[in-house]
Image (cartoon, rainbow, N blue to C red):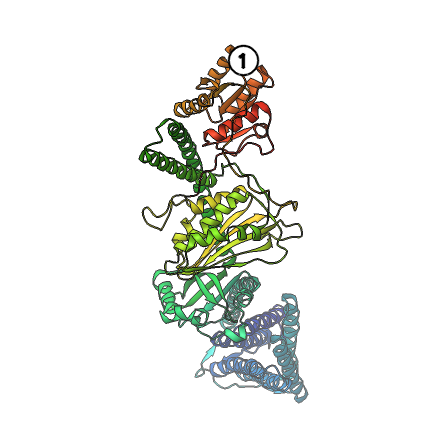
Amino acid sequence: MSHAGAHDTLLVALSIVIAVTAAYTALDLAARMRATSGWPAHGWLAASAIAMGGGVWSMHFVAMLAFQLPGVEVRYDLGLTLLSLALPILATAFGFFAVDRYRQSRPALLASGFVMGLGIAGMHYAGMAAMQMSAELTYARLTIALSVLIAIGAATLALWLAFRNSTVAERALAALIMGAAISGMHYVAMAGSTFSAVQSIRSLNDAADLSQTKLALWITSTTFLILVLALVAAMFDRHFAHLTSREATALRESEERFRLLVESVTDYAIFMLDRDGRVANWNAGAERIKGYTAQEIVGSHLSRFYTAEAQAVGAPEAALKTAATTGKFEDETWRVRKDGSLFWASIVIDPIRDAHGELVGYAKITRDVTERKQAQEALDRTREALAQSQKMEAVGQLTGGVAHDFNNLLMAILGSLDLLRKRVPTDDPRITRLIDNAIQGAERGASLTQRMLAFARRQDLKPRAVDLPDLVRGMTELLNRSIGPQIAIETRFPLGLPRVQVDANQLELALLNLVVNARDAMPGGGQITIGAREEHAPDGGATAARYASLWVQDTGEGMDEATLARAQEPFFTTKGVGKGTGLGLSMVHGLAEQSNGRLILKSRKGEGTIAEIRLPIAADAEPEAAPATVVPYPRTAPRAYTVLVVDDDPLVLENTAAMLEDLGHRVIEARSGREALEMASRARSLDVVVTDHVMPGMTGIELVERLNAERPGLPIILATGYAELSAAAQSLPRLNKPFDQNALARAVDQAVQGPGPEGVVAFRPKLA
């Protein structure tokens, strides 16, 4: 009797759930297989095969447990049962491996699906063959073929879905379809199966069998445990892979940002060196600073950027060794660009080590700080010039004070000697000669004070339009007589040279000092060249000030840098004791500064010296007046004057009073401005006042203002050696210190009677 059998509805549903779950698990594990490589990928492949093959096998046996034959007990052969388990696992593993190995090609997909489908179908029929029961089993060929086709189609679909990217929802839908297809394959095959009962069945006592209930529980629990564990493992792996991917992405983004940062920096040369010091990479800043492109320099040694001198002493190797041993190398020195030019570089080299502390290379940062170095050098030069200027100013103040006091001493000496010469007997020539020698010594001292005042810029200058070629031609005889026959003088003056605004007498003295210095620098003879040229101020521009340079050049021994730096200092000399005062160049410097010009010295040891006086161009073309000839001044006053003499120095006061009394005048002496005011208020008659300027308590200018307020129209003479006076003092009659009796008589007469055509003539000492 034939029987188609019946199915338990609950177990049928359970078998379908097992098939769907196994399909989803296999697809999920296959996704992990695609996301990895190497042995992890093979592990996930095996897991996918076990999940798919084992899940299909579990679905099959749960479905078989759902099949019931009334009155017939069913048992299963263990060997065939294990064979039915191995077939789908091995077939699934082969399918996944082949499709993955051959890059998911269509032929590989179809062939793998065919083999996998046959394995699944073989699993079904092997499991059917494992059934032991008192019935015979027969199959319809059409249903066999249909079940095999369903198995092959489901396997091909599973392989195709396993190797494409999909979302969770897509995998769930695909698993539902695959589970239904695999379940359908089983139940289509069961529909074509016929069971025929027999009278006697072969003995089952010697067969290793499993009871139907135990087998169902074991298969169901084991299957779900394996699938759940596989899904949990895939979930954790996916989580860790996501973390790893996110970290890798962040690392790549960080590296990309750092690469863009390094390559975008143009003010710094940033690049890597290998352990041997060869360039490994190159940024835009390195290309801009050093001139090399990455193609030209990568692979080259670090020494390419060093000067030949630095390479000769092993500087590149020493820098890398210092960085490796101490952790950093820093330096500022010269480096070489591609075109051979030098630049001042700030360099930092840091060692790069791996996780084990092994040296793998170096990071090098170079910055072009040439402009900073030049600015610092310019600042240092400015500070040095400022310090020198402050020093010269301080020395000038000291020199001016000393010259003022020395002037007062010379006043007393010259005046006393002048009066003494009138009173001693003239029949003894030795006495006359001694007095004349003393007067000459005092005159030389007066010349020295003039130089000191010139350096301090306190001498009284009378600038006029001076023709430089005419001035030099007028001094030719004096210059030739001063330098001797071993030295030749050559002049170079361009045609049309404009006149300069300067005190001609002081410029003559300055030129004579420069020529004498040139002579002393050539003890064996040589040549002195005197010339001039018109130039513009160094700052340029259309409105730049014009000036003319009068220069003196010699072929002497020259000066080194240390001597040149101090040459304009007062009292500094290289001529030896007794051979020079050290005030010649100082006087020239003071004259140039006071004339709104400048003294420039250029010299090198063994190459001679050029002294250049820059003087402003005269605003008008009026030539300088011819110097007045100083002759003894005759007394022309119709009567004796009452003269108020004011000076805080007793020697000067007594000497001035003695000279005035010798001229026949009545003298009132005052030692301060306040005492002078008291004397003037008590005097019945007062014709003229001769006052010093620099006095404690009340200056000569302040005294003049008080006297003008109390006695308007009173003639006042200001006796001083200073040139820096207020505008109000410039209109007063001036008597330059030191003065002799002749200059004093002229000043007094002209102050009382009115200035003559020649004005006040100051005492001019002879040149030493």
Looking at the image, residue 564 sits to the left or right of residue 254; the answer is: left
- Where's residue 36, x and y in %? 52, 73
- Where's residue 490, x and y in %? 50, 60
Looking at the image, residue 741 sits to the left or right of residue 56; the answer is: left
* Quadrant occupied by the C terminus: top left
- Where's residue 633, x and y in %? 51, 31
Q: Residues within 10 Å of mark 1 (few under 14, many from 20)?
A: few
Callout 1: SS:
loop
The part of the image, by quadrant, that contains residue 176 is bottom right
Disc 1 residue type (three-letter):
Ser
Q: Nearer the viewer, residue 678 or 116?
A: 678
* Quadrant occupied by the N terminus: bottom right
Query: Residue at left 54%, top 78%?
Result: 74
- Where is 216 relative to 82, above or below? above
Q: Nearer the viewer, residue 456 or 87?
A: 456
- Where is 722 relative to 618, above or below? above
Q: Nearer the viewer, residue 472 or 660?
A: 660
Picture mark count:
1
Provide the residue designation for mark 1.
685
Q: Nearer the viewer, residue 698 or 446?
A: 446
